Amino acid sequence: MTRLIQIFAVLIMALPNVARADIDALYDAMGMGRIIEIMRDEGLSYGADMATDFLNGAGGPEWDRAVDRIYDTDKMAQTLKAGFEEALDGTDTAPLIDFFTSETGAEIIALEISAREALLDEAVEEASVTQLEAAQASDDPRLALIGMYIESNDLVESNVVGALNSNYAFYTGLADGGAFPFEMTESQIISDVWNQEEEIRDETTEWIHSYLLMAYQPLSDAQIEEYIALSKTDEGSALNRALFEGFNMMFTDISRALGLAASIYMGGQEL
């Protein structure tokens, strides 16, 4: 009986390892490691903008070091994977791994990453918006296909919610760090954050459409339709939720840490 219990215990301990192996395979196939590196570059650029626009240069080299620590790729990956694994619990990842390791899936990931890298250049970002405006003016049929993909994954709403959560975490960090010359209540924070919703939605809608229009330009309609079809499966829906959960956890942690770090250099200032 003792031997059977030991064997059962070993099997129970092994099951999560199998799940983690599947998650790791999917994570790697989707190029998440490189995406996190790009997000770090985006974060460092955002931190530099904050130093000028938000802190009026008060942080100096110490602020730069704080931002560098906050956008730690190992920590970011750990948080993202935790949310990813939890949200995909019980999901058959085989169809997802099969797709993203296929020729079409690998090309899609490569294009998404390449476009995200390119958008680190402000000139490229401006050009992508110009391309979107031209496509809208000419009623380019590719826009309808891009729109179907965005809608099937609820990308605008998910990103708006994520941005609002991140802003709430940032304000909470500022408040906890004593940045305000008065006590900032939770209801005040929520009100201030919610007032940004319309602007965030407009910016998010434009960014997602311009990014995907640029990224998917080399793809055929059939390839995009195949990707949309995957998104509509149970496994695709679970993946989309997992990505949102993982990134939401990651950016919430980062935003609160940025708020706490910024509060050091602006204690008592009016915002």
Image (cartoon, rainbow, N blue to C red):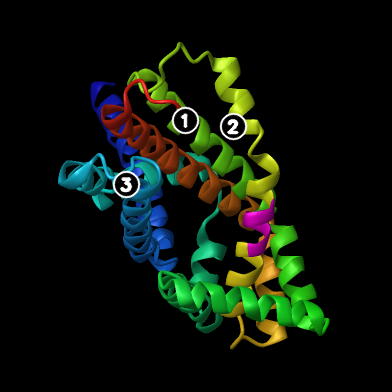
First in sequence, mark 3 or 1: give its number: 3
- Is the N terminus in the top left, top right, bottom left or bottom right quadrant? top left
Q: Which residue is mark 2?
A: 193
Q: x and y percent of residue 261 in the render?
A: 28, 33
Residue 266, compared with residue 217, is above or below; it is above
Q: x and y percent of residue 160 in the render?
A: 63, 46
Label 3 Cα crowd, 10 Å radius (few <14 / some 14-19 / many 20+): many
Cα distance in 3D space between marks 3 and 1: 14 Å
Image quadrant assignment for residue 5: top left
Which mark is drawn over residue 271? Answer: 1
First in sequence, mark 2 or 3: give its number: 3
Q: x and y percent of residue 69 in the render?
A: 21, 44
First in sequence, mark 1 or 2: give its number: 2
- Give the magenta range: 202-206
Q: What amino acid does circle 3 point to?
A: Ala
Secondary structure under tag 3 reads helix
Cα distance in 3D space between marks 1 and 2: 13 Å
165, 226: nearer the viewer: 165
Residue 236, compared with residue 259, is above or below; it is below
Q: Which residue is mark 3?
A: 51
Label 1 Cα crowd, 10 Å radius (few <14 / some 14-19 / many 20+): few
Q: What amino acid does circle 2 point to?
A: Val
Q: What amino acid does circle 1 point to?
A: Leu
Q: Residue at x 55, y 81 (%)?
A: 104
Residue 27 showing in the rendered view:
yes
Residue 45, compared with residue 181, is above or below; it is below
Q: Residue at x 37, y 19 (%)?
A: 176
Image quadrant assignment for residue 173: top left
Q: x and y percent of residue 191 in the render?
A: 64, 24
181, 119: nearer the viewer: 181
